[in-house]
Amino acid sequence: MYAMNFLKKNIFNVLFVAFLLVIVLVPDAKALLLKGLMQIGFYQPNVSTQEKMLSTNLEGIKFKNVKGELVDLGDLRGKVIFLNFWTTWCPPCRAEMPSLNKLYQTFKTDKSIVFIFADADGELAKASAFMRERKYELPVYRVESEIPEQIFKGTLPTTVIFDKEGRLSFHHEGMANYADQKIIDFLRKLKGN
């Protein structure tokens, strides 16, 4: 009887604690909450502060896809490179995936932009299954070489964009809404139209 009275008096507190536990313990629940925050305007990528382009030697920075094909960033000179580091267990990574997929759909037939979604754990089978289950078409890769800290320090997710000359034009640690028109316009500007 006492337990029922306590529960009735504290139902809001019990529900709040249960909600917090779900958010903390279930990655998809946390990702859903973060995705909602992105949709109402939080976590917008800031391309306006990316004025200073840093020169980067991309030679020897390699990634491998599920087909075993090796990509060396140095060989992609003349193309804009959109590189995203993520993992399947990372809630912020999961939260930004729908916006990344939407951005990819916008440019997937554009041969002047290359998208690389690098699973930081290097588990291509697991990452590919994750993409299939969620009906994302993002090209999944695994890191096959050393990555300079200027590009990736280990923070997940991390997104970098290189211009056609291989200069680091955008660097963002943490999640963001990449379906934002500012990013679309930024990529179009980098590719030259």
Image (cartoon, grey):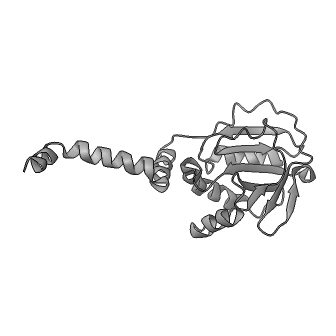
Q: Residue 123, percent across and down?
A: 69, 60
- Residue 136 visible, this angle: no
Comparing 107 with 138, the one in front is 138
Q: Is residue 11 left or right of residue 178?
A: left
Q: Residue 72, percent across and down?
A: 89, 54
Query: Residue 107 occupies which quadrant of the picture?
Result: bottom right
Residue pictured at 50% horizontal, 51% vertical: 31
Q: Is residue 28 left or right of residue 140?
A: left
Comparing 158 with 25, the one in front is 25
Q: Is residue 2 left or right of residue 150?
A: left
Looking at this view, name the residue that lies furthest to the left: 1
Residue pictured at 18% horizontal, 42% vertical: 10
Residue pictured at 88% horizontal, 35% vertical: 55
- Residue 107 visible, this angle: yes
Q: Residue 170, percent across and down?
A: 74, 39
Residue pictured at 78% horizontal, 63% vertical: 65
Comparing 89 with 31, the one in front is 89
